[in-house]
Amino acid sequence: MEKKTTIIINGPSGVGKDALIAAASQKLSILNVSSIDRVKEIATFAGWDGVKDEKGRQLLIDFKAALVKYGDMPTKYMVDAYKEFLRTMHRFMFVHIREPQEIQKLVTALKREGAFCKTMLISAEWAKKTGLKNDADVFNYRYDYHFKNDKPLEQSGSEFVKLIETIS
């Protein structure tokens, strides 16, 4: 059986994380999850319209912080997602986490599960800056890899796939 690789991915809003993963998914077997998936479900139930503007993003940040404080649901959800990943045919699992302390918590939890886990920062000079604290905080972690998304998607996507293939 091929070795399964978990990559915790981060970067400021709008740097192309999802576009790169979508491009890589055309060549590699990838499961793509986010620590905010369940938070979005709760926010939708509470009336969030699904718009990820600054107001919507701040709501998700606030909900996630509350859920971390009360029971650590996002980390537990990601550990469960990892266990499910092990039962799939996917080779890579990308986990989106914004907060450095939450990244470290998940790295520790996944290593206890025996996971091969790496961290990656995506950056782009062209990305629009936001006023969200979480966007500034993404640089406050020592990542295993840093991918600069500074070329057209076709070229960046190919380079991203090559990088992912070397992580294992």
Image: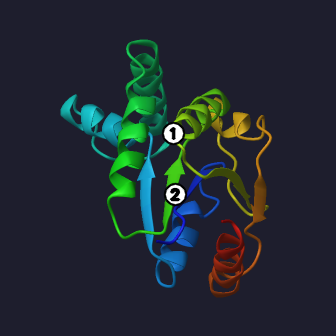
Q: Which residue is drawn at 36% across and 70% down?
A: 89
Q: How crowded is mark 1: few (under 14 residues within 10 Å), some or many (20 or more)?
A: few
Measured in 3D between alpha carbons, the distance from the residue under mark 2 to the one under mark 1, in whole angstroms, is 24 Å
Amino acid at dot 2: Phe
Q: Residue at x 51, y 39 (%)?
A: 54
Q: Residues within 10 Å of mark 2 (few under 14, many from 20)?
A: many
Residue 60, percent from left and from top: 42, 33
Please tell me in which quadrant of the rendered image residue 36 appears: top left
Of residues 85 and 148, which is closer to you in this image? 85
Please tell me in which quadrant of the rendered image residue 73 appears: top left
Secondary structure of the residue carrying tag 1 is: helix
Count of marks placed on residues: 2
Asked if the residue at tag 1 contacts the one at tag 2, i.e. Cβ–Cβ closer than 8 Å, the answer is no
**The C terminus: image quadrant:** bottom right
Indicate whether 119 appears above or below 80: below
Sequence-wise, which precedes: disc 2 or disc 1?
1
Amino acid at dot 1: Glu
Q: Is residue 114 left or right of residue 88?
A: right
Residue 108 seen in this snapshot: yes
Residue 95: assigned label: none
Residue 54: assigned label: 1
Residue 62, percent from left and from top: 45, 23
Indicate whether 46 appears above or below 35: above
Which circle, 2 or 1, is nearer the viewer? 2
Of residues 150 and 99, which is closer to you in this image? 99
Q: In this view, does 121 lie to the left or right of 27?
A: right
The residue labelled by disc 2 is 94
Residue 16, percent from left and from top: 60, 64
Q: Residue at x 77, y 72 (%)?
A: 150
Q: Going by the picture, which residue comes out furthest to the front?
A: 1
Q: Residue at x 38, y 56 (%)?
A: 85
